Image: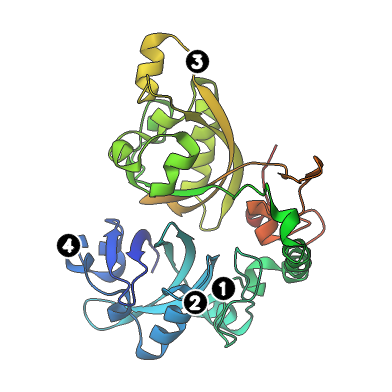
């Protein structure tokens, strides 16, 4: 059996499903309406519920990671699922892929939790977040990243003056029906976290339902199209460096900019994406090279790129190619 779908749940103790893509129907034999509003854990094996709650529930730190579990089908059978999970702005976003028993067993047996905040999570049991089977020797590099970040965080509070927070936002775009749509204005934005306004200066509620390419400057459309097509055909994380438009008070959309013949201001973002032809999750992080210290020097030690969250040394970590970055 094969298949994939994407979904969103809130971060309350119930972890209720806010959205699930139509690809869930052939995988679990549930229609979307039967799942939205219900608790995520209702569809898991009893002994998997607590593990998922610990990894991605309301008490967990911000995570980017993998989770192997079994999900209940409508007829009572279970299917093995590999989840690529993103936490952003108070919601959990999952790209879910059907796996075979061998991969499922390997994923459970070889695991190491690392959070995006740079430290081990609260659960130290067998089910963790980033797995050695997917990361190869990347765990060693992740440990170096943790040590580097902890060293940066241990600096005196006076050194933290001027530290600018990392700006992240998540989006979900809908089903890919025709790759040629990428070169026009599709696919549509199904969900955008409220934190998007800190990157693009436009409210999330104003862009839901609009084409994703309305956020992309014209000169970056072709590159973005290739990136989205690559993600839709992969069952792992893909990372790239893209551009998004920053809107001002006089222009509320890319269409307004095009009509005004004024080039929009753009911002460089790292994008970590996962999904399928049924939908794609995009975690966007504003790129910055460091932070300004009180003495006027610029220090990058307190900042982790999305690539570094996976590996601090992609070229020497023996990571599979689909975990390495295509950053330019």
Of label 2 and label 3, which has the lower sequence position? 2
Sequence-wise, the earlier of marks 3 and 1 is 1
Q: Nearer the viewer, residue 239 or 309?
A: 309
- Quarter residue 206 falls in: top left
Which numbered circle lies on residue 263?
A: 3
Residue 55's mark? 2
Whether label 2 touches label 1, CB < 8 Å: yes
Nearer the observer: mark 4 or 3; the answer is: 3
Q: Position of residue 299 (x, y in %)?
A: 78, 47
As drawn, the label of residue 129 is 1
Q: Quadrant of the C terminus?
A: top right
Residue at label 4? 33
Dot 4 or dot 3: first in sequence order is: 4
Between the C-alphas of marks 4 and 3, the distance is 42 Å
Whole-number angstrom distance, CA of label 2 to CA of label 3: 43 Å
Do tag 4 and tag 2 residues touch (Cβ < 8 Å)?
no
Secondary structure under the numbered disc 4 in the rendered image: helix
164 to the left or right of 127: right
Sequence-earlier tag: 2 or 1: 2
């Amino acid at each position: 059996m094969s298949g994939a779908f994407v979904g969103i749940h809130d971060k309350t103790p119930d972890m209720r499903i806010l959205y699930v893509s139509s690809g869930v129907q052939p995988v679990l034999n549930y229609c979307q309406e039967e799942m939205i509003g219900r608790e995520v854990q209702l569809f898991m094996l009893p002994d998997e519920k607590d593990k998922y709650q610990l990894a991605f529930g309301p008490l967990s730190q911000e995570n980017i990671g993998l989770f192997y579990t079994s999900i209940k089908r409508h007829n009572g059978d279970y299917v093995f699922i590999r989840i690529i999970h993103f936490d952003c702005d108070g919601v959990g976003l999952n790209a879910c892929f059907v796996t075979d028993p061998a991969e499922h067993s390997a994923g459970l047996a070889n695991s190491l939790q690392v959070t995006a905040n740079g430290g081990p999570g609260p659960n130290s049991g067998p089910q963790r977040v980033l797995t050695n089977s997917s990361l190869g020797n990347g765990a060693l590099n992740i440990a170096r990243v943790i040590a580097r970040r902890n060293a940066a965080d241990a600096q005196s509070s006076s050194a933290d003056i001027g530290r600018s927070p990392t700006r992240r936002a998540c989006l979900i775009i809908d089903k890919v029906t025709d790759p040629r749509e990428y070169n026009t204005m599709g696919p549509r934005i199904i969900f955008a976290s409220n934190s998007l306004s800190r990157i693009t200066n436009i409210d999330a509620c104003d862009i839901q339902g609009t084409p994703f390419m309305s956020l992309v400057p014209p000169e970056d459309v072709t590159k973005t199209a290739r990136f989205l097509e690559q993600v839709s055909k992969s069952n792992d994380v893909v990372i790239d460096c893209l551009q998004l438009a920053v809107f001002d008070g006089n222009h509320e959309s890319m269409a307004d900019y095009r009509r005004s013949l004024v080039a929009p201001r753009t911002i460089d973002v790292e994008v970590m994406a996962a999904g399928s032809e049924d939908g794609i999750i995009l975690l966007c992080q504003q790129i910055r090279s460091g932070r300004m210290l009180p003495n006027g020097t610029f220090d990058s030690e307190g900042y982790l790129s999305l690539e570094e969250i996976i590996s601090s040394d992609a070229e020497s970590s023996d990571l599979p190619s689909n975990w390495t970055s295509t950053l330019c």
